[in-house]
Image (cartoon, rainbow, N blue to C red):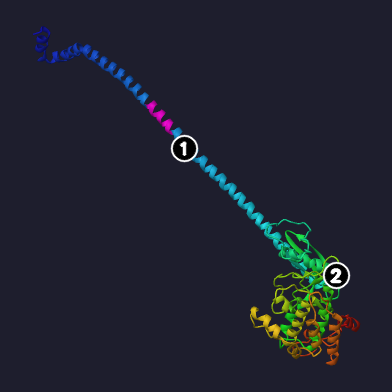
Amino acid sequence: MNMNCIRIMELVSNSEAFEIFLVYFILAIAPHLMNNATKAISYFCLNHNKYAAIKKKKVDELCDKLKGINIMQQFAEHSRMSRQLSIAKRNYNKAVIDDKFRELKFRLGIALVFYIIMVVIICWILYNYYGMAILIFPKTWFWPFNRVLSFPAVSDTAEEEDVNREESALALEIHILKLLQGRKHICQLYSYGTCFGLNFMIISLLGKSLWELQTETPDGRFSISTCLRIGVQSLHALKALHSVGYVHRDVKTDNLTIGYGELEERRIYLIDFGLAKRYTDENGNVRHPRRKPGFRGTSTYASIRAHKQEELGRVDDLWSWLYTMMEMATGRLPWNDLKKEKLLEAKITFGVEDICKILPIEFEEIVLHLLSLTFYDCPNYDFINRMIQNAFKRLGFCRSDPYDWQIAADGKQSELNTKSEMNRDEEKQLLS
């Protein structure tokens, strides 16, 4: 055994020696402890630095990852914001366009309302102060911006009659009105043209049609006195039309009107020349009739030749004029309820005696005269007028008598010619 250890064991029992033992023991093991502690501290420091470096590296890697995630998040956020921004821009542009379109529609609406108000005011002024009416006819839906002052040329050849009938109807109307300006029983043409794809013409304002006036009477017909005076004036109108080389081909109560106002309510006007046809050539000679030109006119008032689809002449206008007189005198024609296929037979079998049961006996001579005429013949307007005047005198009628539409509904006579400037001389001219 080591001597030092024996010595220590011997001294352990001694209390004084115990303290010495502790000091000695501490001094003996202190170098080992210090050495081990130094090693431990050194090892700990080394490992700590190593762990710190690893930790730092991991932290750096983690930071890098976090930065990458951050960048990606920022990029995603940027992309999302970009999309949202583009959507917002589109919505904004759309909203701006919608606002502008809404504003445009509002302005157009205001302009349209203003335009309509102005048109109504102008029409009211023309209607009440100048006795004028505005008639507007659409030209075509395909040329909405055409403002050219032009109309289709009126066809002079029989074969071209039915070409572009709708477009040329107004042109024909204007052409005939221009030829007839200044005639007593033709309305005045003030202006015509094309604006915004619409053809228009401005004519003098007229009153109601004879058909409207007839339906307003208590028994739905006119008196013989009124019928005879209407017959004289409408005969003058047809004579004027025939004198410029045209036939009407649609004479009826719908196309005969009175003038507007008290000054003109005793004057008869012939209107609607849309179906008119030129029957003479450039030299004034009667053209040769076509073989089968087709039906023209209104079946109720059409002549027998019209039902046979033959070319219509001046005499056919007078047959329609005669049927119109019969309807005004009775309120209806004998064949009103018949179908179109049976009208021809009914008119053929309706003889002179039947006509004279409706109209004065003087019309027998008129009917016989019409039966003697062909397509080429010119009617004797003076003879027809003279027969009507004879019937008027025989029946004791007076030219200044009121027309049926001038008599009030209660049977009292309205004030006639008291406010009117039409004197008896003018009345004689209308009925002469």
Q: Closer to the camera, 207 or 296?
A: 296
Q: Are marks 2 and 1 in contact (CB under 8 Å)?
A: no
Tell me if I can see residue 117 in this picture. Answer: no
- The answer to whether 412 is drawn above or below residue 259 in the figure is below
Q: Of label 2 and label 1, which has the lower sequence position?
A: 1
- Which callout, 2 or 1, points to the residue nearer the camera? 2
Residue at numbered disc 1: 76
Tell me if I can see residue 299 in this picture. Answer: yes
Q: Which residue sits at x=80%, y=81%?
A: 372
Quarter residue 432 falls in = bottom right
Task: Point out which mark residue 134 bears.
Answer: none
Q: Secondary structure at mark 1?
A: helix
Q: Closer to the camera, 38 or 406?
A: 406
**Amino acid tagged 1:** Ala
Q: Is residue 307 magenta?
A: no
Quarter residue 281 falls in = bottom right
State the image coordinates of residue 318 (x, y, percent, origin top left): 78, 79
Which quarter of the rendered picture does the N terminus lie within?
Answer: top left
- The answer to whether 81 is drawn above or below residue 155 in the figure is above
Q: Which residue sits at x=46%, y=37%?
A: 76
Q: Closer to the camera, 182 or 373?
A: 373
**Amino acid tagged 2:** Gln
**Residue most toward the right?**
425
Q: Residues within 10 Å of mark 1 (few under 14, many from 20)?
A: few
Left or right for 39, reference 388:
left
State the image coordinates of residue 45 (x, y, percent, origin top left): 31, 18
* Range of residues picked out in magenta: 59-69
Q: Which residue sits at x=84%, y=86%?
A: 387
Q: Secondary structure at mark 2?
A: loop
Left or right for 72, reference 160:
left
Q: Which residue sits at x=73%, y=80%?
A: 211
Residue at numbered disc 2: 181
